[in-house]
Amino acid sequence: MEFSSVTETAFFSASVLSFVLTLAFIYQALKNRLLWIMATAAFFQTVWLLSIAIKHSFSTDYLSLLLLTESAHYVLWLLSVDRSTERFCGTRLPLFFKVCVYFICATSLGLACFNYLTESLKNIEEKLIIWQGIAFPIISLLSIEQLYRNNTQYRLFKLICLALAIVYVFDAYLFTQHLLFAKLDSDLWQARAAVSMASSVLMVLAVATMAQPSQSSAKLTFSRPVIFYTTSLTLAGAFLMALSIGGYYVRIYGGNWGTIIYTLLSAAGLFFIGFIFSSSDLRRKLSVLINKHLFSYKYDYRTEWLKLINQLSQPTSTTDTATRAITVAADLFNCHGGALWLLRSNVMVPVRQINTQFDISEVFEPETSPFCEALKDEWVFAPNSNTHDLGLNNKNLPLWMNQIPDAWLVFPLLTEKDLVGFMVLVSPKEHSLIGWEDLDLSKTVGRQIASYLARHEQAELLAESRQFDAFNKLSAFVMHDLKNLIAQQSLVVKNAEKHKDNPAFVEDAIHTIKNSVERMNNLLRKLQRNEEGEEVKVLHLKDIFIEAIKRCQKRPPVPTLVPFKEDLQVKGDFDSLVMVFTHILHNAQDATPNHGFVDISTILEDDTITVTIEDNGEGMDKDFINNKLFKPFETTKSGKGMGVGVYQAREYIQSLGGNISVESSLGEGTTFIISLPAN
């Protein structure tokens, strides 16, 4: 086996990275996170790589040393994987499998040592190297599969298994090709060093970011961004730059491209590893990145999101919205309960608590406090966390938070950038470490709950606004009726001095006052909420017209009733129907000159009575009829009217199953057409 200086450079670079891996494993073994045999395997891997790199320093029997170091590093990695499976996964390997593994390891290592000391197997050294290079990867892959499949918490071992699997698959391919073609491919042998470098970097990266056991799933998967979005352009640009630098070096100083490439790879690997260990912030970010894109998630986000939406969309009363919000969040994180604060006049006010040990009814938090300012930046607090990252802003927690000993998570309720409240969740039913998934999910849930609470508050405000609108509308109708009654009483008072000695006037005044009292009593009766409403009777239409005309006869032009069948009957309230026709007649009189006319005619078609009130007054344009006539508080009387009479009239006629329509032309007059169901 003759190798060039490029090969030596490649394996020397790989040995340097392997030595860094050894130091990392030793550190983890001191903390009982790895077995010492794994650190020993990394050390002998370093010795094996270094022995290849400096083979020219040995005598011609170099193959005996290579056989020994190859055997040692294969055996130690295999034993370390099996021991880790039993130690960290709680899985007992089959006895037959263990016996076979130990026998193969003892045989291989024994033959290598025997040959190194006696050189009695010198003629078959190369064949032994080839066959063990095929056998050990196959057996090791079986052991790696056991560690990979049975490990549920230690994500570190997932990445170690991945790195070792890459090495063993490549070794099996390398020595199988050597066996088939009876010749070692020098390029593949150099590539073996590159594969070893990559696996060392991957394992160091795993140690730096995944050393702690996780309660999340250790299942290795790939996220959609990793699959569909790559960094091709960045890598291509970096590769071209490295080629340019290397080409410049070869042209100026001479040398070999292979040496340059492996030197660059070694330098890049060392720089990357050093940068990782020197920056705790980078290690944290890298840990989150690896967890997001290489491992399965703690939560099934599709299921959790559908459950959240379904629970928040269920009908609930206004008083139960806060309870629903806490219950939904607590169920999502499997917590016993929580507490909710909402913003009221620049102060966070407690609105509900469920299964918390501390009474929060008197706990208020100013919106401008450092605690709320951090929440506005969408910071999630973990009050009882010992992790530096999670407790970074815990100094801003209010003092009353110490009174909730089981507080687990505090997350903001944000709508866009406005903080509408915050929620405190107590410890989960099963102890769980807070990870990036809990933080991301709590932020998303917080925004959804904030929208849910804001929507219910807006609905409540809208309902209150509608109640006020109804009250204002009712007040306008009452004022409209009172205005008409006051007008009647004012007329009596105005003529009292002149006609107080006239018995006919006195009788008429008493009748007017009596009528006003009756109308006011009817009005008060309708305003009583506990009453069933106005009384519906079968009424003669002629009686209604006579009463309406009587109320309008004191102003010109006096309405004229065109004769019709006297037995026409309708159902309704007498006073309300009289009010409808009186108002329409008054409007016609106001719009018509004294020498004009206001005519009332009636026809019966099928089961519908059509009443037509026609005048030759000023008329109205189409825009006013279509857009303003039947709207409340719209009038043409320039301060004399309130603009609710026609609206009120149509509302009542429609409540009886009828309708009011209008035909009018400016300067020609107006025709009101009132349709009512005949009794």
Image: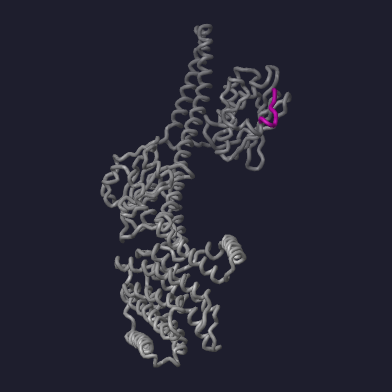
Q: Residue at coordinates 48% horizontally, 64% vertically from top-left? A: 267
Q: In the image shown, does 343 or 454 lie closer to the viewer?
A: 343
Q: Is 80 placed above or below 600 here?
A: below
The prevailing secondary structure element of the residues shown in magenta is: loop
**Image-quadrant location for residue 633:** top right
Q: How many marks?
A: 0
Magenta span of residues: 617-624
Determine which quarter of the picture holds residue 133. bottom left
* Depth check, front residue: 170 or 630: 170
* 228, above or below 189, in the image: above
Q: How is the image coloured?
A: one colour
> Horizontal and vertical percent for residue 520?
46, 25
- The structure residue drawn at horizontal position 38% and vertical position 81%, both measured from the top left corner, is 72
> Camera-side residue: 62 or 563?
62
Q: Residue at x 33, y 75 (%)?
A: 37
How far across and how far down the image is residue 209, in percent? 40, 62
Pinpoint residue 49: horizontal percent, then vertical percent.
43, 75
Q: Is residue 666 visible?
A: yes
Say if the magenta span includes residue 502: no
> Is residue 618 inside the magenta stretch?
yes
Determine which quarter of the picture holds residue 591. Answer: top right
Viewport quadrant of the C terminus: top right
Front-most of residues 566 and 398 = 398
- The image shows residue 640 at horizontal and vertical percentages of 58, 20
Could you tell me which residue is drawn at 59 percent across and 32 percent down?
Answer: 631
Q: Is residue 437 visible?
A: no
232 up-or-down from 136: above or below: above
Quick check: 530 above or below 432? above
